[in-house]
Image: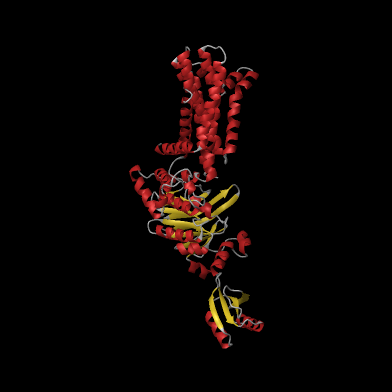
Amino acid sequence: MIQVEDLYKYYGDRRAIGPVTTTIAKGEVVGLLGLNGAGKTTTLRVLACDLLPTSGMVRVDGYNVVEQPHEVRMRIGYLPDLPPLYGDMTVSEYLRYAARLRGVPSREVDKRVQVAEELTELGSERGRLIGALSHGYRQRVGIAQAIVHRPAFVVLDEPISGLDPAQIVEMRSLVRSLRGEHTVVISSHILSEISETCDRILVIRDGTIVASGTEAELAASQRGMRVDVTVAGGGEGVAVRASALLGALPGVTAVEPVNLRDQSEDAVSFRVASDRDVRAELCQALVRANFGLLEVAHSERELENIFLELSSGPGGRSGRAHAPAPAVSTTEASA
Amino acid sequence: MTKALLVARREMFAYLRSPLGSAIIAGVLLVDGIWFYWQGLTEKLLSADVLAQFFYGASGTTMVAGLLLSMRLLAEERQTGTFTLLNTAPLRDVEIVAGKFLSALVVIVVMTLLTLYMPLLILVNGKVSVGHIVVGYVGLVLLGGAATAIGLFASALARSQVVAIILGAAMLTPLVLLWMVARAVDPPLNGFLSDLAIHHENFRPFMLGTLKLQSVVYYAALTYFFLLAATKTLEARRWR
């Protein structure tokens, strides 16, 4: 278990994170979500004992990162945003070195390296120089060094950064494969990526955790919802009448015309914002008014909106200067 | 200290695979060879004087080599991000510093031993004692170790290798030139400054084949001081 209580980290006079209070249970795969500069990397560096906190308490398996850093480092594997790789070593040489540094007994090193290589599918590259590997393979080597000593906790800082779509899919399955044996903390600024791989999401904003929960819980926590509605008929009159009808529905707070992907010229679409789920009433109203209802769906941008609202605060990015919003989960304390 | 040996082995490996180690050794051997020919073989000198001149010249190249070898030790790791591997592994900062220092010291020992053919030429063709040669080499290794420790401290402070070498040179040069300052001031300060100089009064006994305990202690203390400073710098960085 990782316990973080009232954690602060300052770089000079600038507060990078704090207050951060959270608990990560054993076996959980937790995603740390936030915009660039929100404090994700600093939080992970403190967890990995790479940085010491200015104040507050961080315990990993009961060991304090300030007082017992060696015990903590034995239990944590860390992949920073820039993997710490020596280009002049082969994959196997490097993993052996990392294993020995992490205290793996010499008689077990080969076995552990082999397991890490198999798990990260590096077997075919084990004899190659790291400097000659592609970005995707380098990320794999980075993960392999983080798990080669079989740590209880694995901390991955933006592991999909810079990967192509195929590599992202592979990385996702690799992170999923860590589930069970390791407790994983993974950071990203892409909500869909985090929600694909994590049991729980911690949203960090301005150095503070402002929300915690699954994607559904986070979505529910945000007031209202957005749906995209498409009706047949591309004329000006259809658009005006449909817009007026939708705007008059109880619960609807805003209606805006949008151009959806694959939308035919003979149709018009609206994004309807409401303070509750109005899909049923909306469909009934359109059908009664003889509109050709083609599609009603959750807005494609719903995930992005949730993320932006949570991570940027009111007013988008400029909202970072505002006070943090109340945490969704009552287990997350943000002062 | 097993972990320090691991770090040292990795660094030795890096010196072997990169052109830096070979280039420094080749450069030192070239300069030492030219110096030996110029000072020792073109003038009529006593064998012991030729040997002393050889150690005098070699001391300069050894100091420069110590700085060059140590500049990358920590600064490069920080530049490339590999320092995180050491920083998040269960090893103490003193083990990191000890491992790094040890690797550079081994290269210096190998490098100085490769110059052995020159004193051996004097031994075979002239009249010098084996003790003079041994003491001279002990001095070279002690001096090289001290210069490496200074360079390592500079490397711990700097974020780039270029800054590290400049910082190292900025610390080493005043220590070399202290004997000149000592000449310009009155007693008892001149004696104190002269004793603090890294080369003049402290290396001369080794050049002449005299093993002076005071100088041995001086080099050991200087090396320890800068290694401790490098360790404390690494510890302090975790709080930044």
Q: In x, y percent, where is residue A139?
A: 47, 53
View extreme (left): residue = A107
Q: In x, y percent, where is residue B106?
A: 45, 31
- For the image shown, how many numbered marks are present on the structure? 0
Q: Does residue A7 appear in the picture of this structure?
A: no
Colour pattern of the rendering: secondary structure
View extreme (right): residue = A236
Which quadrant holds the C terminus of chain B? top right
Q: In x, y percent, where is residue B171?
A: 59, 31
A27 displayed left or right of B142: left
Image-quadrant location for residue A276: bottom right
Residue drawn at (57%, 33%) of the image: B168
Residue drawn at (46%, 61%) of the image: A169
Return the residue nearer the eye: A166 or A21: A166
Q: Is A289 rendered above or below residue A48? A: below
Residue drawn at (40%, 52%) of the image: A124
Return the residue nearer the eye: B67 or A157: B67
Which quadrant holds the N terminus of chain B? top left
Return the residue nearer the eye: A231 or B183: A231
Q: Is A276 rendered above or below residue B114? A: below
Image-quadrant location for residue A237: bottom right
Q: Does residue A317 appear in the picture of this structure?
A: yes
Q: Is A172 rendered above or below residue A91? A: below
Q: In x, y percent, where is residue B24?
A: 53, 31
